[in-house]
Image (tube, helix red, strand yellow):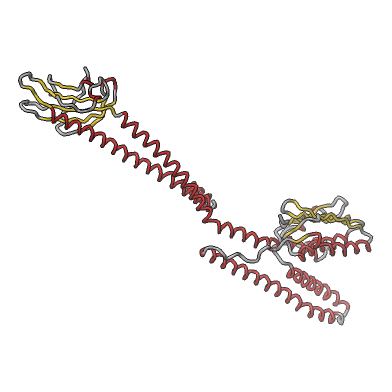
């Protein structure tokens, strides 16, 4: 039971604020309005019945004031007119009766040969009962003492309460229709209020997407006070992150540049060493130089692609592909290209050039006669494919090459430092890279990057 409650709470913790507020409003309306309707209906029914009973009690008092006893005839008499012809119409639904609980009884003409049931009650009481022909009656009655009788007389007045019940029913219908309309109106007004109240949050969400896509650098602070403070804090965090990124890039670049001069000096010094030890030093210096160039290129990589404004792929790569095409012609290699001219991506232009340039450079180095490059869009994903007809790599080498922590240049001699930079950039843009055997027998590199602009 507890785990079910926890799961339910976890599911609802991610629901939208709009849904939560609307459900709260709906719950309030569904609880408050029926409760108010029940209270109003009860109050109106009580008031209507009380007023009806008071009318009957007034008639009862008139009858009591006019009742007499004839000691000669030993009969109860009532000669006063009540002013209501319904007491003269047979079974009209309006009746009065005077009885001594025994043989003396005086009734209205409307009661004809029927009698009203009586109860022993000295005070005025009201109740509902079944009368002649199954009529539902409301009766008011009491006992009185009339000289020279020793036993009390029971006087009662009854009337059909169908009009009363119809009046109460009409009130209930009107009330529930009114409450239903009020509930619908409240839901509509409160839904508009919720939408209006959350409009700044929607604007802030749109603004965040603009910042994420690179079309805006800051969040708009023209918001209500509560959200304006939040937007200012987020702007401060964005600015601080940008400063940290720039500082890290500059630091890595400065460090790489600072190491290049000592490396050049060391290369000159190595040439003065004997030939038997010079080779080992040159190998180690070459490894250090490769690492420096790698981190220098990595420092120039901008990072998360979704933070950049859209760029046109064809215009960004035009000069690079043109230069590599001339290089391919000098090597007697055919470079085929299939680039979507209308595609735009959220990337830094230099990062895109680094990826394409390094892949094509590697393919041209190993190709025999042909290299192909394709750049297409699949929804929001950029599909980059570079193939060659060189010796390629085995399935095991391809699988090992894309393992986390592996460098492509460590999997195959001559693959070059550029492929390691490609791996790093693909990871930075949260993409995927697949290596497989090409149809022409060489290496087929497929890269997917979620950077295509909508």
Determine the image quadrant of residue 355: bottom right
Pick the front one: 55 or 201: 55
> Residue 22: horizontal and vertical position, in percent?
50, 49
Pick the front one: 287 or 334: 334
Answer yes or no: is residue 282 visible: yes
Compared across the picture, whether 267 is left or right of 258 comes to right
Pick the front one: 249 or 395: 249
Q: Is 251 above or below relative to 15?
A: below
> Residue 299: horizontal and vertical position, in percent?
73, 70
**In the rendered image, which quarter contains the C terminus?**
bottom right
> Residue 131: horizontal and vertical position, in percent?
26, 23
Number of numbered callouts drawn: 0
Compared across the picture, whether 346 is left or right of 386 comes to left
Q: Residue at x 79, y 70 (%)?
A: 290
Q: Residue at x 73, y 54 (%)?
A: 381
> Residue 195: horizontal and vertical position, in percent?
53, 53
Compared across the picture, whether 255 is left or right of 170 comes to right
Q: Is 7 above or below relative to 162?
A: below
Pick the front one: 256 or 360: 360
């Amino acid at each position: 039971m507890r785990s079910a409650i926890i799961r339910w709470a976890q599911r609802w913790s991610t629901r939208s604020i709009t849904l939560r507020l609307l459900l709260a409003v709906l719950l309030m309306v569904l609880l408050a309005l029926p409760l108010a309707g029940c209270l109003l209906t009860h109050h109106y029914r009580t008031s209507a019945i009380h007023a009806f009973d008071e009318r009957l009690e007034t008639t009862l008092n008139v009858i009591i004031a006019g009742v007499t006893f004839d000691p000669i005839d030993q009969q109860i008499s009532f000669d006063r007119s009540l002013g209501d012809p319904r007491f003269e119409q047979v079974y009209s639904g309006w009746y009065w009766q005077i009885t001594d609980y025994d043989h003396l009884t005086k009734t209205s003409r409307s009661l004809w040969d029927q009698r009203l049931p009586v109860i022993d009650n000295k005070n005025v009481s009201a109740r509902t009962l079944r009368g002649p022909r199954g009529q539902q009656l409301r009766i008011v009655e009491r006992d009185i003492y009339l000289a020279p009788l020793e036993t009390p007389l029971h006087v009662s007045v009854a009337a059909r309460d169908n009009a009363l019940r119809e009046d109460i029913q009409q009130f209930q219908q009107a009330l529930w229709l009114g409450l239903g309309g009020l509930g619908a109106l409240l839901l509509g007004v409160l839904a508009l209020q919720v939408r209006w109240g959350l409009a700044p949050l929607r604007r802030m969400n749109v603004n965040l997407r603009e910042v994420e896509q690179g079309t805006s650098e800051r969040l708009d602070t023209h918001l209500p006070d509560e959200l304006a403070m939040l937007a200012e804090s987020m702007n401060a965090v964005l600015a601080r992150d940008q400063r940290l990124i720039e500082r890290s890039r500059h630091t890595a670049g400065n460090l790489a540049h600072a190491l290049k001069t000592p490396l050049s000096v060391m290369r000159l010094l190595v040439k003065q060493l004997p030939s038997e030890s010079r080779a080992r030093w040159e190998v180690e210096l070459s490894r250090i130089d490769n690492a420096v160039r790698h981190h220098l290129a990595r420092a120039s990589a901008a990072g998360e692609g979704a933070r950049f404004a859209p760029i046109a792929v064809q215009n960004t790569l035009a000069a690079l592909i043109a230069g590599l095409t001339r290089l391919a012609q000098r090597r007697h290699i055919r470079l085929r290209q299939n680039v979507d001219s209308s595609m735009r991506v959220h990337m830094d232009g230099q990062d895109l050039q680094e990826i394409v340039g390094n892949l094509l450079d590697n393919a041209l180095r190993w190709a025999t006669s042909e290299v192909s490059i394709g750049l297409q869009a699949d929804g929001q994903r950029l599909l980059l494919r570079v193939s060659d007809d060189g010796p390629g790599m085995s399935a095991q080498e391809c699988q090992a090459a894309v393992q986390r922590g592996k460098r492509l240049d460590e999997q195959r001699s001559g693959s070059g430092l550029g492929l390691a930079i490609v791996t790093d950039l693909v990871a930075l843009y949260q993409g995927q890279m697949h290596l497989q055997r090409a149809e022409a027998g060489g290496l087929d590199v497929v890269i997917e990057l979620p950077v295509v602009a909508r």
